[in-house]
Amino acid sequence: MLRHPTFLIVVLGFLNALTPFTIDLYLPAFPQIAADLDVAVSRMSLSVSVYFIGFALGQVIYGPLLDRFGRQRPIYAGLAIYILATLGCMTTTSFEGLLVFRFISALGGSAASVGAVALVRDHVPADRAARAFAMLMLVLSVSPLLAPSIGSVIATAASWRAIFAALAALAIIDLALVVFAIPRTYSPDPSVSLRLAPIMRTFRDALAQPQFRIYTLAGSLSFAGLFVFVSGSPAVFMDGFGVGPGGFGAIFAILAGGMILGGQLNHLLLRYFPSELVFRRALLIQVLSGAAFLLLSLTFQLGKWETVALLFAFLHCAGITYPNAAALALKPFTKNIGSASSLLGFLQLGFGAVAAALVGVLDLTGPLPMAFVMAICSATGWVILMTSAHATNEANAGERASG
């Protein structure tokens, strides 16, 4: 393991940032794409949901591959698929074609994210993993800070198709980083089976690990609020509040800044408090923020900046819960880390995709759909964490009494 992994974490952050750039870069171009492909702007949210679904499935696919064949080769293959599919998005002439290529690009691009998480555990000791994930989150958070503004500039100066050309170029840069900047320290494990039944047993065994199950479920529900925001914010701010592409990019940057500040605060807190305590307190504050957002959405006519402030508070907490949940969930594993990290990513994306889809099907107006789903997700995560912790404490007490 590396003694000074900062450079490696930055490189892995760029690798992990491919997906948020893929999601966020084209959001300001929704009206332009919708007009060109002759669909309603509201239907463009399907292209986000489709990407989430493909990305979640890709998490399951690449985990066993990363354990069986090593880290580099599956990442090479995934990035190659991503590049070809993204070029397909650039050249498509139909909305249906865009959805198909977005789904395929998600399947390929997920290799970068699963690989980045597994590589952190390969190179960073378990007791320093939470800080490493916090640094990863910092680099990751820069992408939504920059992506919508960059996408707005590209769409205005050229067209929405140039946005996908830029994404393909970013993937080529990531491929070069994997080739030249990431050391090969993990030895492929030929004993890892690629047959469905053994793979499912590996996932079942991971879920049977109490710490993995608790922090994966609670952390995924906490992090689902980010997906709710990404899928619902164009309709709330651009359609509901009449914000233009440039203004939307600025608002997106402000809210991404909330996550960045959360990640930096988490880095500081971990110097003085254990990761479990930081996660529990941050999730509780997020629950209170979500409840306040929902209550105010129901009782007041929230304006643009009130909505921004409430979203900022909620996403700030997500910047703290995400790295701690990932580190705590993967801490028990010394083998099959790739499979465990892929299951972690699958569940995070799966919960996020369901939450994002729920926002679209709710027959509600304004920020209320986002507030409702965010509040439900965070509260459910808190209930899982507290219920599981209580059950674990009782089991431990029983074992001590019987001993």
Image (tube, rainbow, N blue to C red):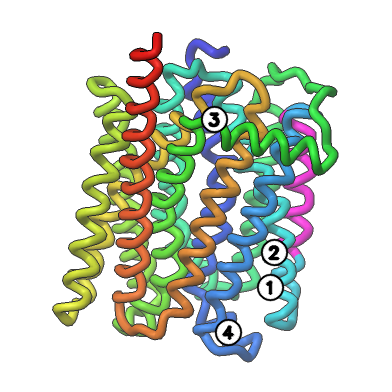
Q: Earlier in the sequence, mark 1 or mark 4?
A: 4
Residue named by callout 2: 103
Q: Nearer the viewer, mark 1 or mark 4?
A: 1
Marker disc for residue 209: 3
Neighbours of disc 4 within 10 Å: few (<14), some (14-19), many (20+): some
Neighbours of disc 1 within 10 Å: few (<14), some (14-19), many (20+): many
Q: CA distance from mark 2 to mark 1?
A: 6 Å
Q: Earlier in the sequence, mark 2 or mark 3?
A: 2
- Amino acid carrying label 2: it is Phe
Residue named by callout 4: 34
Residue named by callout 1: 99
Local secondary structure at mark 1: helix
Task: Tell me residue 237's x, y (percent).
Answer: 34, 76
Identify the magenta region.
Answer: 71-87
- Amino acid carrying label 4: it is Ala
Q: Residue furthest front?
A: 402
Q: Is residue 362 left or right of residue 48?
A: left
Task: Tell me residue 10's x, y (percent).
Answer: 50, 32
Q: Earlier in the sequence, mark 4 or mark 3?
A: 4
